[in-house]
Amino acid sequence: MQVRVYYEDTDFSGIVYHANYLRFMERGRTNHLRLMGASQHALFEQAEVETPGFAFVVRSMELDFLRPARMDDVLDVVTWPVAVKGASITLAQEVRRGDEVLVKAEVRVAFISEGRAKPIPKSLRLLLKADVAE
């Protein structure tokens, strides 16, 4: 997914403010589902039937800031799955400018319902190409 850096994304020195990479990566994770062919509304309606009141929450995130991005740069946010377990998904992400990796991240997202971790519903596991046999 491409993102252009705007003035509002930068600090006073014209470099992307570190917290804005989190926003770019959040959009990348959402877009990742879209690129996998998910109709998000239909997918979430099905998951709601299986697990009412569910939510995805970021459980942990490890970031490595390698190089700065600057105003007007065009960045690529690349997302790929690392592991899908019972109640969590681990994704790797990179923010790149051309071939140059600027930020690396590993994100663990938990599936919760009623305030507790729950197994990811079959419909979501199928979409994520996870093993659905438990």
Image (spheres, helix red, strand yellow):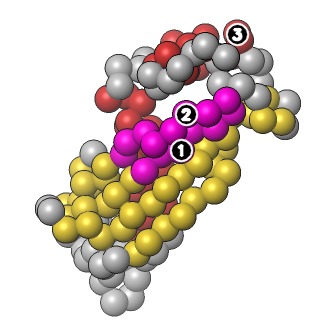
Tell me which label, 2 or 3, sits earlier in the chain. Answer: 3
- Residue at mark 1: 90
Mark nearer the viewer, 1 or 3: 1
Q: Secondary structure at mark 1?
A: strand
Does the magenta run of residues contain 91? yes
The CA distance from mark 1 to mark 3 is 24 Å
Res. 103 image quadrant: bottom left
Q: Residues within 10 Å of mark 2 (few under 14, many from 20)?
A: some
Residue 61's quadrant in the figure?
A: bottom right
Q: Is residue 61 above or below residue 41?
A: below
Report which residue position mark 2 lands on: 84
Q: Amino acid at mark 3?
A: Val
* Label 1, label 2: how far apart the Cα atoms are: 6 Å
3 sits to left or right of 110: left
Side of 94 where 117 appears, left or right: right
Q: Nearer the viewer, mark 2 or mark 3?
A: 2
Name the residue beneath numbered marker 3. 49
Q: Are the two marked residues, 1 and 2, in contact with CB atoms closer than 8 angstroms? A: yes
